[in-house]
Structures are given as C-alpha cells and as structure tokens.
Image (tube, rainbow, N blue to C red):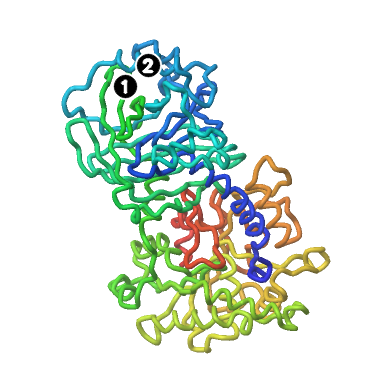
Amino acid sequence: MMLLSFICNRNVSVIVILPLVLCILPQISSSFTITTTLNRNHHEYAPSFFNNKQRYTTTSRRCRAFQSVIALSAVDTTNDNNTPSAPVDDKFYKLASDDSTQTKLTPEQVVAYNAAIESLPLVPPSLDVNSGWRLLATISPEAIKGDNVDFFDINSWKNYIGGKGPSPFQSLITGSSRVSGLTQYLTPENFDNMVEFQIGPINGKLILKADQEDIVNNKRIFRFKRGFFILQTIWGSAITLPYPVPFALLGDRAIGWLETTHYDEASGFRAAVGNKGTKFIFQQRREDSVTIPADVALASEITSTTAQHETDDEERAANEGLTKRAIVICPQQFGGKPGDYTVLTQKLRDRGYPVYLTRLSALQWLSITKSAFSAAYIKGELEPRNALGFYMNAVDETIQRLPTPDTKYTILSHSIGGWVARAWLGEVASESVRKRCTNFVSLGTPHLAPPPESLVSKVDQTRGLLKYVNDKWPGAYWDDVSYTCVASKAVPGKLGFSDLDCLLGYVSYLALIGDGKVDGDGITPVKGALLEGAASIVLDDVYHADVLPNPIGSRNTKLIGCKWYADQLDEWVGAL
C-alpha cells in the first residue's frame, strides 16, 4: 500500500479504511448468505428474523433464506409518532413478544401463527399490494415438525441433497450475523427487497432486485436479476459492494412467485404463500408507501451502469455553445477515472462553463510505483516531472482538446491535483500555454508541507515532491494568475474511537502538517489548504471527496450521500 500511495497526502486514511472494509467482507458475506441463499429449483421469498425488544434481529445460527422458516420477528405496533396503530388481531402481538428469541418456531407457535393468519380476511380478487411491506415472520411447510437447517442435523443434509433445502454449511458460516429488518417494495414492474443489518460498528443494507414477470390474480411471479450491499462508511456516506451471485446464469432457477392469501386493511397485516409452500407475514409500511429510500435508488443506478469517459466528440458536443471560460479539471490521487467528477462537470456546464477533465486510468496511476525503487525516492528528492510524468502528459492532452490554440482556461484542481497542477504550470507547460491560464482554484489541496522541525517531516510521505513544488513556485506564484484556495472545517481532528471521522481526520492532519488537533475536510486540514497570497474560501460542512479511491480498480468507489465541495459550488464558482 505504501508503494501505491507514497505521494498520497491522505495515504494514512486509505490505509486505515481499506483494512476495515476487508475485515468486514467475510462477515457481510455471511449475513448475505442468511438472507439470500438460493434453493436448487426456484427462489422462494423467505428471509428470516426474530424479535429482540422491537428490533428485527437474527442469531442466524440456524437461519434459512428463500425457502425455510427461521423465527419470529417484532411486530411494529406504533407509527412514527409512537402512537398505537389501528386495532388489529391481538394474536400477532402476543406471538411477537419480547421472549421470542429462539432460532426456530416451535410446533405450538406454528399452530398459533397459522390460526392468526386464518383470522385475517381473505383477499379479494386482484388486490392492489403495490407498497412497502415489512416482513414479520416466515413459516415453512416443515416447521410444524420442528424441521431446521443445522450442520449436525442429518435431516438438513437429506433436504439439501434432495433439493428441498439450503446447504447445511450455511449454519456454520452465518453464526455471527445480525439483521434489523426486511422491507419488500412492490410496484407494477419491480419486486425489490431490502435487508438492514449491523455487523459491529458497520450498518448496512442488502438489496435484492427482481423484475415482475407476471401478475395472475393475487400471485406475483418474479425473476431476481441482481443484488448489492450498501455499507455505511465515513463522512455520513455509504459505499456499494456487489452481491456475488450471477442471477443471469441461473435461468429459471431465479424465478419464484408469491401469492397473497389474506389481508387486513385496518392493521396492514398481509399473509402470503410462496412457491415452496412457505407462508409469510407482512405489515404495510404506510409512512413511505412504495418510495424506495434515496440511497437505495442512487446505489441501484450506480450498480446498474458502467461508467465511461466522454469521448472527444461527446465532450465537444456537451461544451458547444457554452460561452464562459473553459475549465480544466486536475483530479485527486487515483482520480480522473470514468465516473469521477461527472456531477461537478454537469453543474459547471449548466452554469455555462465548458469543462475538460484530465482523464487518467488505473494503469497510469500504478506507474508511480516505478519511482519507489529509485535513489531519489529513498533520498526524498523526487521531482514531479519524473515521478508524475503520466499526469503531466494527461494535462497536456487535455489542453490540446480546448477549442482553439489561444483558448483561455481556469485550472480547477482537487486534492493533490492542486500541487501537481502548480508543478505542471511551472516546468511542463510552455510559456504560451501557461499564459492562457487566467485562474487557479484548488479544492481541499494539501499545499503546505509539515514544519521542518516536526517528526512527520522526516517521513515526508510525498518523498520530496511537495517540498520541490513549494521551493520552486511558492504561494500564489504567477502574478498573471488569480489564485483561490477552497478548504473546509467540517471535521475536527480528535483522538479516540467514538468518532471515526474525527479519528481519521486527526491521523491525516497530523501526517500533513504535524498537528492533528485542527479542523479540516476529513483529509486536508484548513491550515494546509491555503496558499500564501491566494484568496481563501473556508466552508463549514463539506468533506474532502465524494469517492473512495481505488488504487487498482478501473473506477473509484462512490460515497453515496457524501456532501463534498461540488455540493456547495455556489460558494466558490465566482473564483472560476
């Protein structure tokens, strides 16, 4: 990792975050296995939960998914104002008591649940169930016999071999997972399912998306098409991870059906049966109807599309007719990949600015590792022209895409792109090209090196690059360029594990300027982001970036819901 990030002015946070993600992946996979295990023929919608003081949880030791019973789960008897909902059959509330924490239903409970279901009104023909539904309980056909998935249970192996149940290995690998609720969202086109879970300090969601194949009276036939995880991470945001089952290769095994049999309009309770005979009990989410959460909708869009760079022709067409000064974006470390800065680019174009992104690939970024074996690296005497030649060449290529040889432009730089652009202006750009640059704006750029007397200066994570830039082109160096530095004080650096954002901020700030107890954007401290002689704009509540850099991936990981500099464009757009 250090070889990949020796010029990264936020390498400490990357090193901290990536192992954290890697550590939880196996546990996430286990949680996933609980809720989405495929049967050998068709899917049956049967994730499973049980009650633990009004939280939907599962100890998962003996959990089954998509075909078998697990246990009880809490029935939410209140609305958003914590007031009792409409009168309902008391049997459901008695069954979903706080004592129901076993991992399977007893035969007596199965009888009681079945009786409660039968007490609900039968559904009329073609009942409209397009809405959001909380899953409360599942009852498999074998539950009355106490049948259960267990690695040491011979009957579990018989069911698995006979195609009637999931692999008993599941009971071994799902021993520590926890879920807090499952919601099914039904629309005329979709049959989507959302599982919320927690693994240690990590909150997450598992989304399984299915297409509505057909509706026959009260039977909905669906085909699962894809799935993904949403994991809460830093800066109030989340990342997505793919669900590792290729539904497209499963053919008809990805098809299932669910038929509504009973429904009570007053309480919102609904009972249904699946294609394997499992019964399901739902309660309608009337507070949000069929509205899928915004983070899920955005994650669905991200995971269903493959980002591509604009072609030169597409870029030219998008910029045509825009009359303001051209913007050249110099990206952050491991940035400039497909999908990066697309929202910012569109916002700028909407305001009349033609935008040209410095395009970079993972392969280009990996070329920095060559410098790690040089004498200059060991001595801490790297020079940007040599170590970052690929970046300099990419900026040159971007300048060549401007409409005319005399087009004036503004450099809009992000993170390390700021001091890389300063080096490009100083020793790569020709005199005529440099003079066409009228404005320079940096977003969260760590311009300043730590004090020479500080301990971190001896380490110098840029291995001399930043010192080289500041020695040769200090501050707002060019008199004919208008400099503006934009910083943020959203994250105070603090030691302690109660706030991960503050801890990561502390570590990053300490590495950059030798002082961790200052304010910054979560990566770059305010003190390090401002150049002497430049105008400064310090924002209150934006974070460093809206992506998590992926050193080896073809694109970076989107931080869903993260508020970063582009989200307060109006505060600094005048500097362009």
Pick the residue in front: 517 or 65.
65
Q: Residue at x 73, y 46 (%)?
A: 495
The residue type indicated by label 1 comes to Gly
Residue in the image at 49% along x and 74% along y: 360
Indicate the position of residue 349 as horizontal and vertical percent values.
35, 65
Which quarter of the rendered picture does the N terminus lie within? bottom right
Q: Report the side of 285 relative to 4 (left or right).
A: left
Q: Which residue is mark 2?
A: 85
Residue wearing tag 1? 268
Relative side of 18 to 232, left or right: right
The answer to whether marks 1 and 2 mark residues whose Cβ atoms lie closer than 8 Å is yes
Picture quadrant of residue 397: bottom left
| Secondary element at image label 2 | loop
* Residue 222 image label: none
Tell me what residue is drawn at x 47 percent, y 71 percent.
329
CA distance separating discs 1 and 2:
10 Å
Under circle 1, the secondary element is loop
Q: Nearer the viewer, residue 87 or 157?
A: 157
Where is residue 352 drawn, in percent x and y?
34, 66
Q: Is residue 378 left or right of residue 188?
A: right
Q: Position of residue 296 (x, y in %)?
A: 40, 45
Above or below: residue 85 compared with residue 31:
above
